[in-house]
Image (tube, grey):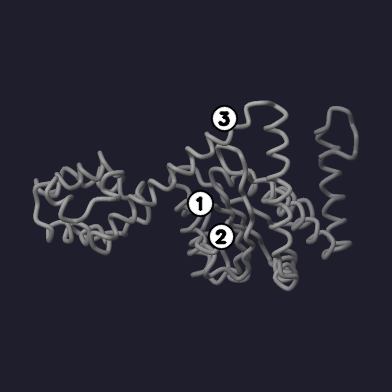
Amino acid sequence: MNPQSAPTNYRELREQLQERMPKLAQGQQRVATLLLTDPEGTAFRTIAETAALANVHQSSLVRFATGFGIKGYPGLVKLCRDYLSDQAHLVRRFDQVAGNSSTEGLLASVLEHEQQNLSRTFARIPSEQWDKAVGLLAQSPAVYVMGLRKCLPVAQLLTYLLHLVRPRVHQVAPVVGSLADQLRDFQRGDVFVAVSIRRYTSDTVYAFEEAKRRNLSTIVLTDNAASPLAKDADVVFFVDSQGVHILRSISAFISMAQTLATSVAQKLGTESRSELLVDEALLTSLQVYADGDADGD
């Protein structure tokens, strides 16, 4: 097997197994089939047990893992256990929703979690890091914002609000095959803002790494220090996303986006006001608002 980029989670492992299955030897195909059909069992089996089920030698399992860039059999087990953990989190969220079957109970529980998310998020922000992020967003030649899947609305809102108060704000939202085209515009001195929570989207991680290679300043909004975006960011904010929902809450992320944009507007002062006046003139000429109200969204 030719080594390639090592899978960082079970989904990536599954995709690589499916892609390379026809080219694997028979013994390797049996190992791959076991991993695809029974990741739960693999998460808790010893190497001897898995080798016996696949009818291969234990050393073959080690070579199989190495061929995928994984550190031996323990690396395979870890990917399967992380997958189980993700599934368990999802099941717990279903159970939590079921446990709040009454409207009053669900609303009260949501309110409590959202208040805690906001309080914890803003309480842990160092003032010097906040000021640094606001300065970068206000003064850089251009700002690029990226968030995908559940983080997409956060990126959309932050892009929209920043563009109201300063020029050259772009959302990186690639359709299939277009990511390279959007990354091409990155220039030294620009700012890249990445928004991602577990499970972290590979396109966002790749774009962040490309921004670092091109010497852009980087700001990250993510959920914890284990995020692949956290270690090398110039500024990182850890945002709480716990809730009773089946999918995690992004309310604190939305609040962060609004507050960052407000701080940038305050820092720019009259500059941001002039941008808003230009925007308002365009909105009026295009008759965007049905009621003709100048105080639109």
Q: Are marks 2 and 1 in contact (CB under 8 Å)?
A: yes
| Secondary structure at numbered mark 2 | loop
3D distance between C-alphas at marks 2 and 1: 9 Å
- Is 23 positioned to the left or the right of 175 in the image? left
From the image, tell me which residue sits under label 3: 98
Which of the two discs, 2 and 3, labels the residue nearer the N terminus?
Answer: 3
3D distance between C-alphas at marks 1 and 3: 23 Å
Q: How far across and how far down the image is residue 27, in percent?
A: 10, 48
Q: How far across and how far down the image is residue 253, in percent?
A: 67, 51
Q: Quadrant of the N terminus?
A: bottom left
Q: Residues within 10 Å of mark 2 (few under 14, many from 20)?
A: some
From the image, tell me which residue sits under label 1: 198
Which of the two discs, 2 and 1, labels the residue nearer the N terminus?
Answer: 1
| Secondary structure at numbered mark 3 | helix
Foreground tag (1 vs 3): 3
Looking at numbered disc 1 in the image, what kind of residue is underneath it?
Answer: Arg
- Is 295 positioned to the left or the right of 81 in the image? right
Where is residue 66, by image quadrant? bottom left
3D distance between C-alphas at marks 2 and 3: 27 Å
Which of the two discs, 1 and 3, labels the residue nearer the N terminus?
Answer: 3
From the image, tell me which residue sits under label 2: 224
- Is 142 positioned to the left or the right of 225 in the image? right
